[in-house]
Amino acid sequence: MRHNIYEPSKLASAGYLLAVSALLGLVMAFVIFPVFGGAGMVAKSAVTSFESLPADLKTPPAPVRSRILAADGKTAIAYFYSENRIPVKLAQVPGITRKAVLAIEDSRFFEHKGVDVRGITRAFVRNQTDGELVQGASTITQQYVKRVLLQDALQKGDTKAAKAAVDKNQDRKIREIRYALALEERLSKDEILERYLNITYYGAGAYGIGAAAQVYFGKPVAKLTLTESALLAGLLQSPSRYDPHKNKGVDATGRRNVVLARMGELGFISPAETARAIKEPLRLNSRTIPNGCVGSRYGHFCDYVRRYLLSSPAFGSSREARQDRLFKGGLTIRTTLDPRQQKLADQAMAPTFRKGSRYAAGIAVVQPGTGRVTAIAHSRPFNEDQNPYVTSRQFQTGSTAKAFVLTAALAKGMPLTTAIHSPHDYTSRVFRDGSKPYSLSNDARGMHGVYDMRSGMAASVNTYFVQLEERVGVDTAVRTALAMGIPNPVDPRTGKSQFEDYLAYPKGYGSFTLGVAGITPLDMAVAYATLAAKGIRCFATPIDSAVDSTGKVVNVGRRDCKRTIDEGVAAAATEALSWVVNPKGHVINGNTGGGANIGRQAVAGKTGTTQEIKEAWFVGFTPHLSAASVVFDPKHQVTLPGGDSSNRIAVRAWARFMKAALASAPIIGFPQVSSRYLRMSGHRVPDVTGMGQQEATRELTRSGFNVTVSGQQLPAWPIPAGHVARISPSAGTRLPEDSTVTLYVSNGQFPFGGLPCRPGTPGCPR
């Protein structure tokens, strides 16, 4: 009965095993005898040691590089690897490439069963006189075993086992042979050859023939030519010695020609092919494959993906496990990055500051309703300082935080028409600043009067929003920010949640609406995207899908979207924020968002600057995209150029991007605002002009207002002295309950100067 060489019978295998054992003992005995003496003892020891070894070789998968792709599935963003390896199937490897490897490494591979007895004998005879151990007779199967043992030891961090895997001694050789014989019973020749080609190191950081073809020739393995195949096969013996980049490739060319000559000897190629190939010059198309984000065209986005994966519990049980999976797991990760939008974002950021400027700018772009991050850009290249400003660095947000108080107030039932008298300077009756009442001012001296949510947002009136915050409560405003997608930020200096104190001591943080909490631009883009998505909050994600090298789906965390804001509230908040860009025909002094108008597209958003003007923002959205644009001093030391108007830089950068990105997008308007958010609110101010001061005070108090009397008396004849000449806000204005009305009292004099008029006096009105 004949037995297939790929599936030897147990009887045949046992016989072969005994023959190899006996030969091995004999060879080892005579090799070592000159040194130790006692050939019989050594032979018996070798056979006993051989037969006692385990035959089951554990073959864990070799580390495989992961690739990060853009949303189109084609554009490569980056590669991550501990070993640059691209696994290939044997069918992908050209026949001529396989022949080159077999010719120089193991020409009898398909004839032996893991150990080449003829080769061992030949090597023994050749090396015996030198007193060396058996060398030069390792089969491809044995070489594969050696590499598996070394790789397994290195992955476990077992330096002792790693040393044992490469030591030139009897024990290592016996172990290799034992495993090789057992492996050939379990795997076919093709399976062993495929694994060998994928695990072997080819130099220049290339592990496996797939990566080697890319690194040396810039092509897939299937397109390797005869001379290219011979060069790669020649590297297997010593990748560093035959490195084609050294010594002008002389040694590499010589080694390649040795391989070609051997192929000719074996009849793998004809004499004419051999002669032609040997004359060919060395032609390399070397490619460096950067490891990680440095050097990537999309460095900032790549770094965000890396940080996202390494912090995702779904991706691995620990940071170390996640790191291993990313660098060794052979993953194909399709991200959310839109190459076109990324290019436009880069172009939008480039003009903000000249190269070498101490200032910087960045933008984060999010798709409402999905949370997909489509672009991340900076005015500085990633490899300049590698600081993830847009995705990880927390900035004070300035007036962009007013959107949280606005949304909270609307959620409590207050309409957009909620009017509040907002003086230039205001001392809160609710909030504290340590032991004192909290005091603040508006940015511009002329900014005072009665505002509602829309006009107050357009002019960014600090005293309006602090009073609105008094009615809403800081704790409610903070919970609204969380509901809109702001994660509970942790102060990197203290490790403490920044929002803990806001929730625990709401009367101590009236400045929340002015943007004192540290929040990343990406998170602000997410929060505003919640309004753009009609109240659907989607946390940011940079990943659409991930699979391993076998095509199995890898869990990187589910996309998290849910309704957190009422749809009507979101529409009303959007209406107020749209006034920042277009106040609907009203003249709003102090409005700074007009530059964000990008044509027919509906736009809403908010500018913001910090107190010392070290950061300036514009966070804005359309129904298509939400983006946060920020300019800043990375060292947080100096005031931004332009002072109070520095947020215009952020506005212009935002508008440059959005106008280009949405040039061909359909025109979609914002949703209609329900009438419940447009109803007139509060009480009308009664007309108390001409009344005595006390009578006027009683009337206003009955109407639900607080009263203050100005120290400035007005010449208002014929209104008698001590009577009310004028009120602010004016009569008929609708104000919320508890609003303050200021009385201006007449001094009884004629408006143009002089004594009080009497009827008939020249110059007095009739």
Image: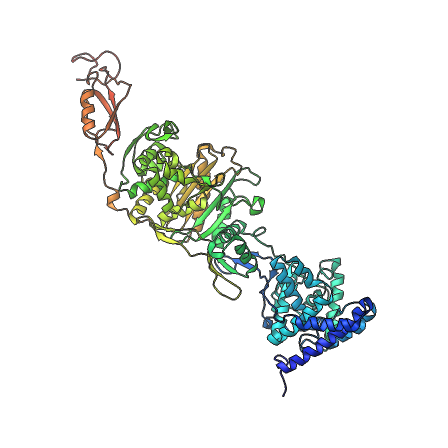
Q: How many labels does the image show?
A: 0
Residue 278 in sight? no
The quadrant of the rendering that contains the N terminus is: bottom right
Give coordinates of residue 759: x percent, y percent.
16, 13
Q: In the rendered view, would you say 672 is above or below 501?
A: below
| Left-right relation of 545 to 187 | left
Q: Residue furthest bottom?
A: 1
Colouring mode (rainbow / by chain / secondary structure / one colour): rainbow
Q: In which quarter of the image is residue 404?
A: top left
Q: Quadrant of residue 99?
A: bottom right
Give coordinates of residue 442: x percent, y percent.
37, 30
Q: In the rendered view, would you say 271 is above or below 652?
A: below
Q: In the rendered view, would you say 165 is above or below 617?
A: below
Q: Quadrant of residue 154?
A: bottom right
Name the one closer to the observer, 239 or 218. Answer: 239
The quadrant of the rendering that contains the C terminus is: top left
| Left-right relation of 55 to 697 | right
Residue 453 in sight? yes
What residue is rendered at 43% in x and 40% in y?
498
Name the one closer to the observer, 750 or 428. Answer: 428
What residue is rendered at 38% in x and 34% in y?
509
Give coordinates of residue 666: x percent, y percent.
37, 54
Q: In the rendered view, would you say 58 is above or below 117?
A: above
Name the one closer to the observer, 237 or 656. Answer: 237
